[in-house]
Image (cartoon, rainbow, N blue to C red):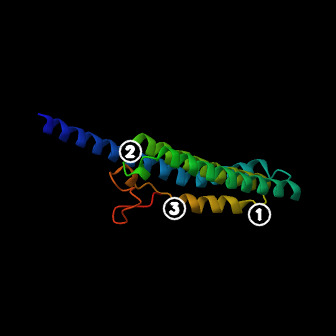
């Protein structure tokens, strides 16, 4: 009876992991496409209402503010994700909820770093240098697709190079 219960618990955990990875992929693809939808909407609105007057000083200020946001917020999100995934670095699996929360924190931080410059560039009609932070954040976002390895057992043992897998 206990073997059967253990088997059922293993199947439940595997099902939750698979469901969480599927949900993470759906969210990832949605966030991947969101900047293009925002860009299309902003372009349409700009064609209707015209370009907002923006001085070179305002464009430079938005560029500096966006870069400062990315420099401060992305490492903070990475540290928070590492905090949520601390069991992974002890050789245990990460719970599906902590996995998705850790990825969402990082993805949303990058998404804000993508969308704010896009909207500002479209509103003012000045694409450089304001678009650079959005491109950098988008490329970084592209490398963070959901894998789900952290939810598997014993992939975070740093001392065993055959089992260790670097988290993404």
Q: Position of residue 122 (x, y in %)?
A: 73, 54
Whether residue 41 is situated above or below residue 5 in the rendered picture? below
C-alpha span from label 2 to label 1: 38 Å
Q: Pick whichever, 54 or 88, lies toward us.
A: 88
Is residue 43 at all visible to an observer of this figure? no
Q: Quadrant of the N terminus?
A: top left
User: Which residue is the site of mark 3?
Assistant: 143
Give left or right: position of 34 versus 99: right
Q: Residue at x 39, y 43 (%)?
A: 96
Please tell me whether mark 2 sits on a helix, a strand or a loop.
Answer: helix
- Residue 85 percent coordinates (x, y): 46, 47
Tell me residue 72's x, y (percent): 69, 51
| Spatial CA span between label 1 and label 3 | 23 Å
Measuring from the top left, give residue 67's x and y in whole percent. Answer: 73, 56
Q: Residue furthest left?
A: 1
SS for callout 3? loop
In the rendered image of this protein, does residue 9 appear above or below residue 48? above
Q: Nearer the viewer, mark 2 or mark 1?
A: 2
The residue beneath circle 1 is 129
Q: Which one is earlier in the sequence, the residue at label 1 or at label 3?
A: 1
Residue indicated by mark 2: 20
Please identify the quarter of the rendering in which residue 138 is found.
bottom right
Residue located farthest toward the front when viewing the structure as drawn: 159
Lower sequence index among marks 2 and 1: 2
| 106 is higher (above) or lower (below) than 144 | above
At 86% across and 52% down in the image, what residue appears?
53
Q: Residue at x 57, y 61 (%)?
A: 140
């Amino acid at each position: 009876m206990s073997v059967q219960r253990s088997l059922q618990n293993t199947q439940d955990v595997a099902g939750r992991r698979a469901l969480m990875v599927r949900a993470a992929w759906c969210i990832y693809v949605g966030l991947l496409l969101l900047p293009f939808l925002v860009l299309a909407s902003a372009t349409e609105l700009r064609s209707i209402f015209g370009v907002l007057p923006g001085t070179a000083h305002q464009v430079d200020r938005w560029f500096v503010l966006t870069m400062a946001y990315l420099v401060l917020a992305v490492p903070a999100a990475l540290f928070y994700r590492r905090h949520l995934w601390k069991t992974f670095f002890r050789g245990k699996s990460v719970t599906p909820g902590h996995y998705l929360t850790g990825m969402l924190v990082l993805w949303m931080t990058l998404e804000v770093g993508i969308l704010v410059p896009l909207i500002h560039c479209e509103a003012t009609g000045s694409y450089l240098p304001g678009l650079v932070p959005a491109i950098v954040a988008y490329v970084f976002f592209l490398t963070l697709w959901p894998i789900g390895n952290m939810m598997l057992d014993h992939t975070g043992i740093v001392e065993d190079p055959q089992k260790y897998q670097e988290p993404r």
